[in-house]
Image (cartoon, grey):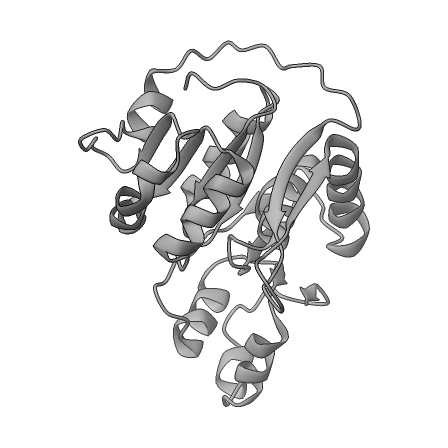
Amino acid sequence: MGTKLKFPQSITLPNRQQFSSAQGPLSFPGLVFMPGTTQLTAKDILYRLRASKAKCIVASEEVVPAVESIVSECPDLKTKLLVSPRSQNGWPSFQELFQSASAEHSCVETGSQEPMAIYFTSRTTGSPKMAQHSQSSLGTGYTLCGRYWLDLKSSDVINNMSNTGWVKATIGSVFSSWLQGAYVFVHWIAQFDTDTFLDTLTTYPITTLCSAPTVYRMFMQKDLKTYWGRNLHLNHKQKL
């Protein structure tokens, strides 16, 4: 990627398999990842890139027009990677680079207080604020969350519905599950649909569901009796 240690790398992807795939190659060599949702506008992306002085952005196809409209105003941005089977002008394919990368790599020995990730707070008054997390705070936090809050075991299958701009997406979909040896179930839908999601829960062996309270309220508005006998694996592991 041509990026250097400690420089922020923006990840603007939906909740798909590539979101997890992108974070591993960034965190192992000691790069600082900065996740964001695909709902960000061009103005939002510009603010984040300039505030963080990000050197690289990894984005999906729907984000490319917004990035291209502001890229001339981001002098620190040197590399653009596209999560797509094919490259575009100025956007090498992340998948192609991933497939051609060597299977051998050396992890960087990072200090406990060195930065690992940057998240932006929700805007209440003024512009969003950068919140930097260290190797220790996130590393220890992921272990505690996976072991005690999510109660993950190596036999578990977790489905985390969090938006990728939230730290909970990384907690549930990436590091907590990896550290506990659990499986991650990824089901991306453009817009949440209760029936589709309940069908998913009764079709696949998902044991742990991590979601916002709104989803559970929508569940309660449905006739759940039609689902209880359909191989529903969830037991006590529904998490907010």
Horizontal relation, residue 98 to residue 180: left or right: left
Residue 77 in picture, x, y percent from top left: 40, 30
Q: Residue at x 43, y 43 (%)?
A: 17
Q: Residue furthest left?
A: 89
Count every numbered label the image shows and give the total: 0
Q: Nearer the viewer, residue 214 or 68?
A: 68
Horizontal relation, residue 122 to residue 21: left or right: right
Q: Nearer the viewer, residue 115 or 179?
A: 115
Q: Residue at x 63, y 66 (%)?
A: 234
Horizontal relation, residue 66 to residue 182: left or right: left
Q: Is residue 191 visible?
A: yes
Residue 158 in picture, x, y percent from top left: 59, 53
Q: Is residue 238 above or below residue 85?
A: below
Q: Is residue 64 above or below residue 201?
A: above
Q: Residue at x 26, y 31 (%)?
A: 91
Q: Nearer the viewer, residue 13 or 17?
A: 13
Residue 82 in picture, x, y percent from top left: 31, 35
Q: Is residue 56 above or below residue 159?
A: above
Residue 187 in picture, x, y percent from top left: 42, 56
